[in-house]
């Protein structure tokens, strides 16, 4: 069906803004200053609008410019049209931002869900550059607090007040040791048993390391650290080479090749960390960041069994207002 253009006036948004400005200021001079144009040019614009409409919009007096009855009706229409245009453009920009742009995600190196998240996001949004910054807990928090990263996946047991968090689940720590190690025949180990062995450890700014140190201190245990490495892959390789035992989150273990390795749960007590999605409270997430946040929520809810209230808290934090 062909569109009928005969009854559509040829008017643009700048012309509608000109009418609104004169109505607001009650003066051609003031309206021209606001619109950054000259008074004669504004007068010509209004004359053309009135010619197109076939009616007068303003009554000019020596003291003030006033709207005619037709002008008051036109003002209401102009405001509605411009407001609808503003809302539509904002919506289209948000949609466009979801289709292109950049998202920076900081993540602890123990997140075995990360490859799946990256793969699914790239398939859904191939035009968006996704930058992944892997590091220990302290580095992830620094990236989020400084604004380098849009959001982060990290441990949430100790967070500053400036960071917002929604839960993703818990990570239980396990002992990792060579399959031929004398402890590998056991079904579980204690921290006291591990303390007799050389330890391959993450650095001090790792939340995992701090949890282990605190647990050892409470039990009066001194751990024997043989090697410190800041990459999970390096830790696993060093353990496989026989340099010692490591204590790692289950997510980290699941994300790497465990051939030649044994993993044992730690008891007396069990060691675990809360895992969550973190953002800077004062920073409004971009549509692209909200999109990957919802994907993270979806991946974790299907693999970790989040409670309903945890799923809803994620949705409320990253929903478009």
Image (tube, rainbow, N blue to C red):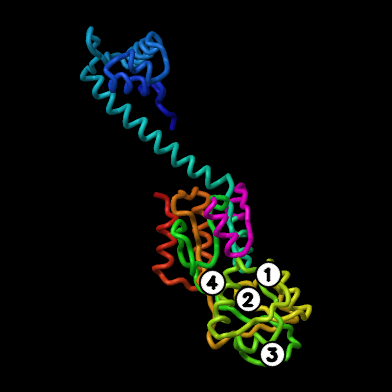
Q: Secondary structure at mark 4?
A: helix
* Label 4 close to label 1 by CB (< 8 Å): no
The residue carrying mark 3 is 183
Q: Does 29 lie within the magenta span?
A: no
Q: Which residues are magenta?
A: 122-146
Q: Does 128 lie within the magenta span?
A: yes
Q: For the point 56% across and 53% down, which residue is it?
A: 149
In this view, the mark in front (4 or 1): 1
Residue 243 point in image, percent of width and height: 76, 79
The residue carrying mark 2 is 248
Q: N-terminal of the two: label 2 or label 4? A: 2
Dividing the picture into quarters, in which one does residue 221 lie? Answer: bottom right
- Neighbor class of circle 3 (other Cα within 10 Å; few <14, some 14-19, many 20+) is some
The residue carrying mark 1 is 232
* Label 2 close to label 1 by CB (< 8 Å): yes
Q: N-terminal of the two: label 1 or label 3? A: 3
Q: Residue furthest right?
A: 241
Q: Secondary structure at mark 2?
A: strand
Camera-nearest residue between 64 and 320: 64
Mark 2 to mark 1: distance in Å? 8 Å
Q: Does residue 23 appear to the left or right of 290 in the view shown?
A: left
The residue carrying mark 4 is 303
């Amino acid at each position: 069906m062909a569109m009928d253009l005969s009854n559509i006036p040829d008017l643009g948004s700048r012309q509608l803004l000109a009418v609104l400005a004169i109505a607001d200021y009650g003066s051609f001079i003031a309206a021209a200053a606001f619109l950054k144009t000259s008074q004669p040019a504004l007068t010509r614009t209004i004359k053309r609008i009135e010619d197109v409409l076939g009616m007068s919009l303003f009554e000019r007096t020596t003291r003030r410019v006033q709207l005619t009855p037709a002008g008051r009706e036109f003002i209401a229409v102009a405001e509605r049209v411009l407001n609808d245009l503003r809302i539509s453009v904002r919506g289209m920009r948000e949609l466009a931002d979801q289709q292109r742009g950049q998202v920076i995600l900081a993540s602890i190196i123990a997140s075995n869900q990360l490859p799946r998240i990256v793969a699914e996001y790239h398939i859904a949004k191939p035009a968006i550059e996704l930058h992944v910054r892997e590091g220990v807990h302290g580095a992830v928090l620094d990236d989020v607090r400084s604004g380098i990263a849009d959001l982060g996946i990290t441990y949430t047991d100790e967070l500053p007040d400036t960071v917002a968090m929604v839960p993703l689940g818990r990570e239980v720590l396990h002992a990792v040791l060579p399959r031929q190690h004398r402890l590998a025949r056991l079904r579980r180990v204690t921290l006291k048993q591990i303390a007799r062995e050389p330890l391959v450890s993450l650095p001090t700014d790792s939340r995992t390391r701090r949890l282990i140190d605190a647990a050892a201190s409470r039990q009066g245990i001194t751990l024997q650290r043989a090697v410190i490495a800041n990459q999970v892959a390096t830790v696993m390789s060093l353990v496989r080479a026989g340099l010692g035992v490591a204590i790692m989150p289950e997510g980290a273990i699941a994300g790497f090749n465990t051939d030649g390795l044994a993993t044992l749960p730690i008891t007396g007590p069990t060691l675990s960390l809360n895992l969550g999605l973190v953002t800077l409270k004062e920073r409004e997430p971009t549509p692209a960041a909200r999109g990957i946040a919802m994907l993270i929520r979806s991946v974790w809810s299907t693999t970790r069994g989040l409670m309903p209230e945890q799923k809803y808290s994620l949705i409320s934090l990253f929903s478009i207002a």
